[in-house]
Amino acid sequence: MGCLFGIFAGLFPRLGVLLIWLARPVLFTAAFGGAWLLPILGVIFLPFTTLLYVLLWTPAGLPALSWLWLLLAVLLDLGGWGSSGYANRGRYVGRRA
């Protein structure tokens, strides 16, 4: 079951966050301290980062190596935003063909 979750979470991070929230709501709530705005913004704009933060979070905080994984998730999310902008560069106003 863990491998199946890993595949779905890698392909569809928002679905992975939803599954974590449904399966273990206490973990999700504890990771964000009961806040609701930050997780929603995270799911909308940085889904991989939000998913990894919830999975790597411990009550003592994030271990040192977890920060590296979180940085890689942020870069992956930002890469998705940048690649979609590059792929649609012909739609920008003032861009010559």
Image (cartoon, rainbow, N blue to C red):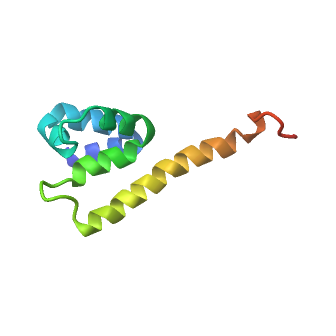
Query: Compared with residue 53, is residue 97 higher up or lower down, i.e. above or below?
Result: above
Q: Residue shown at 26%/68% (left/top)?
A: 64
Q: Is residue 22 left or right of residue 88?
A: left
Q: Is residue 25 left or right of residue 40?
A: left
Q: Give residue 35's quadrant in the image.
A: top left
Nearer to me, 46 or 23: 46
Q: Residue shown at 31%/32% (left/top)?
A: 37
Q: Position of residue 79 (x, y in %)?
A: 54, 51
Q: Residue shown at 28%/68% (left/top)?
A: 65
Q: Is residue 90 left or right of residue 69?
A: right
Query: Compared with residue 79, is residue 27 higher up or lower down, i.e. above or below?
Result: above
Q: Position of residue 61 (x, y in %)?
A: 18, 58
Q: Position of residue 34 (x, y in %)?
A: 18, 36
Which residue is farthest right? 96
Quadrant in the picture for the C terminus: top right
Q: Position of residue 6 (x, y in %)?
A: 30, 48
Q: Is residue 73 left or right of residue 28?
A: right
